[in-house]
Structure formats: structure tokens, C-alpha cells
């Protein structure tokens, strides 16, 4: 089985800014927004860390910008002539924008670590991004104590820098279990992670050999909560396994009912003899989305 085709040229190319054409107009107030000021200060202090993303060149060697409009504006204002760019091999730029228009937390971690490895002090980064130094340090050490399997599951997600401190309390096997639950539930909040940690048996907690004690919770209540969380995880995994088939069946049923209701004879029969069934069919057909 061959490797999937790459969506971009592997190595960034240094392109003249004059050959890069924006694909949309900059929003009003961009230059005075806090986000743009952070981007401007970051590039001014440490240079461009994340390359721009562009489409394939046209006959005149011009490139349509897919992602990085604010960075391009900042580069022009700072007097740059060229910029490193990733050239997309896929013409469907909307697919790229929909998927990676927002940096994941691990991508931010990699960028900050790369900048520090190049000799940029964390204090300088914090000043350039106008954030507290503690925020930079948390992102810098985001994956410390997180097993590779759990980090891979979190690769494309956006979550708080405080999540790493919660997950590293768990042993690797339990880290993977909890992250799988978070991905399945699409819930990456620190509060949810703390709830999973609270319901974790003591032998799966790093450095704990004895039963934990929580204020207001007895040992029996803690054991019961751990059992219930274990049962809930099993039920959730079973539901997740059948979800795809259930959605497929619903799509097919909705399509079939739509054709059925287009038959005037059937519609008259249901209206006259089975109005309750007709209402249910209408509700299924009129669903705007399967996840609502």
C-alpha cells in the first residue's frame, strides 16, 4: 500500500512578496486589531516562524495566497522583500483553509520550541506576543510527560496549555484512554480532564500507591465513581463503534422517505389514514443536519 500523496511541496520556497496575490480583502480595522499587533511584533522580534501557504503558480509565476494574509500584510509593512512559502499541490484551496486555518496547540508548541532552539529567549517571545512569560513556558513544555501516543491523538486539536499539567498526572496507558475519550466527546477542557483524573484508579496515577482522599468524598464514594466512570467509558466506546453505521442508515432512510413522499398516492393515503406516521416522516426528511 503506497503512501498518500503530499498536499504541499515538502520544502518551503523563498518567494518575492510582489508575486504573492491575496485571495481576499483584508477586514476593516485589521491594522489596529490586537491579533495583528501581536503578529507584527512577533515577526519584528524573531522573524517569520510559520511559512505562508500559497497555491501553484500561474503562467506569470504569480501565487495565490491560501493562508497567512495578516502575516503577509505585516511582512510588507516591515519592509521584507521575500517570505518562505509552502506551495500547495491541490487546486482546491477551500479544503486547505477549512482544515488548517487555525493552528493546533501542538503546532504552536512546535513553533515556540523551534524559536527557542534558534536562540530566541522565552522572555523575548512573551514580549513580542504581548503575553505573560508563564504562558510561553507552559506552551514550551506542553508535551513534557505526555506519551507519544496521546500526543499524536492531540496533534490536530486546540486546547488549553494547562491540559498538559493535568494529563501528566496519569500513567501512559491511562493518558491514551482519557485522550481517546476527549477526542470522541470533542471536549478538551481542563475541567473534563480533571474529572477523568478524579475517576482514575490510584494505580494509574503517577506516584500514587495509596487510595486518594478528596474533601467531602468517602473512599466508598470514590470507588463507586471509578466503577461508574469505567462503565461509562465502555458504553461510550460501544456507541462510538455503531455511530457510523447508524448515521449511514439514517441517510439512506431519509433519502428513501423523500422519494416515497414524492408519490402523490402514498402521500394522500398517509394523510387520510396515518397522519401520525406522516408527521414522523416529515420530521426525518426535514432534518437540516444529522448532528442536530
Image (cartoon, rainbow, N blue to C red):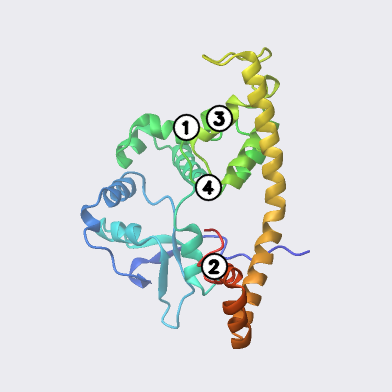
Comparing marks 3 and 1, which lies closer to the viewer?
3
Comparing marks 1 and 2, which lies closer to the viewer?
2
Q: How far apart are marks 2 and 4 (CA)?
A: 34 Å
The mark found on residue 195 in the picture is 3
Q: Which of marks 2 and 4 is nearer the N terminus?
A: 4
Q: Horizontal placement of 44 versus 120: left or right? A: left
Comparing marks 2 and 4, which lies closer to the viewer?
2
Is the residue marked by circle 2 packed among few (<14), some (14-19), or many (20+) residues within 10 Å? few
Q: Horizontal placement of 19 versus 33: left or right? A: right
Q: In which quarter of the image is residue 134?
A: top left
Q: In this view, does 178 lie above or below 270?
A: above
Write the residue at 42% across / 50% down: 49
Give the farthest residue toward the bottom.
264
Write the residue at 63% across / 39% down: 150
Residue 200 visible from this viewpoint: no
The mark found on residue 157 in the picture is 4
Q: In which quarter of the image is residue 51?
A: bottom left
Q: How far apart are marks 3 and 1 (CA)?
A: 14 Å
The mark found on residue 162 in the picture is 1
Seen from the viewer's position, the closer of residues 91 and 161 is 161
Tell me the quarter of the image containing the N terminus: bottom right
Q: How far apart are marks 3 and 4 (CA)?
A: 19 Å
The mark found on residue 128 in the picture is none
User: Which structural element holds mark 2?
Assistant: helix
Comparing marks 3 and 4, which lies closer to the viewer?
3
User: Which structural element holds mark 3?
Assistant: helix
For label 2, the residue is 283
Q: Earlier in the sequence, mark 3 or mark 1?
A: 1
Q: Earlier in the sequence, mark 1 or mark 2?
A: 1
> What percent of the width, then of the height, locates residue 173?
70, 32
Q: How far apart are marks 4 and 1 (CA)?
A: 14 Å
Amino acid at each position: 500500500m503506497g503512501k498518500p500523496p503530499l498536499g504541499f511541496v515538502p520544502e518551503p520556497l523563498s518567494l518575492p512578496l510582489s508575486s504573492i496575490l491575496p485571495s481576499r480583502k483584508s477586514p476593516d480595522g485589521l491594522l489596529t486589531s490586537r491579533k495583528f499587533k501581536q503578529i507584527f511584533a512577533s515577526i519584528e522580534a524573531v522573524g517569520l516562524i510559520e511559512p505562508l501557504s500559497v497555491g501553484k503558480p500561474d503562467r506569470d509565476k504569480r501565487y495565490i495566497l491560501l493562508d497567512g494574509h495578516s502575516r503577509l500584510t505585516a511582512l510588507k509593512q516591515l519592509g521584507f522583500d521575500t517570505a518562505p512559502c509552502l506551495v500547495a499541490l491541490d487546486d482546491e484551496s477551500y479544503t486547505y483553509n477549512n482544515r488548517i486555518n487555525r493552528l493546533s496547540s501542538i503546532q504552536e508548541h512546535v513553533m515556540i520550541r523551534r524559536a527557542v532552539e534558534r536562540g530566541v529567549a522565552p522572555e523575548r517571545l512573551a514580549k513580542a506576543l504581548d503575553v505573560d512569560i508563564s504562558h510561553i513556558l507552559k506552551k514550551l513544555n506542553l508535551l513534557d510527560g505526555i506519551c507519544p501516543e496521546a500526543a499524536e491523538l492531540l496533534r490536530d486539536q486546540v486546547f488549553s496549555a494547562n491540559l498538559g499539567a493535568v494529563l501528566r498526572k496519569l500513567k501512559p496507558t491511562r493518558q491514551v484512554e482519557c485522550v481517546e475519550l476527549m477526542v470522541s466527546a470533542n471536549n478538551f477542557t481542563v475541567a473534563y480532564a480533571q474529572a477523568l483524573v478524579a475517576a482514575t484508579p490510584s494505580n494509574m496515577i503517577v506516584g500514587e500507591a495509596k487510595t486518594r482522599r478528596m474533601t467531602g468524598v468517602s473512599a466508598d464514594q470514590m470507588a463507586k465513581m471509578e466503577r461508574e466512570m469505567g462503565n461509562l467509558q465502555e458504553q461510550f466506546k460501544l456507541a462510538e463503534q455503531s455511530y457510523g453505521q447508524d448515521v449511514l442508515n439514517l441517510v439512506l432512510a431519509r433519502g428513501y422517505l423523500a422519494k416515497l413522499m414524492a408519490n402523490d398516492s402514498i402521500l394522500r393515503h398517509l394523510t387520510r389514514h396515518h397522519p401520525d406516521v406522516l408527521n414522523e416522516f416529515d420530521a426525518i426528511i426535514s432534518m437540516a443536519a444529522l448532528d442536530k
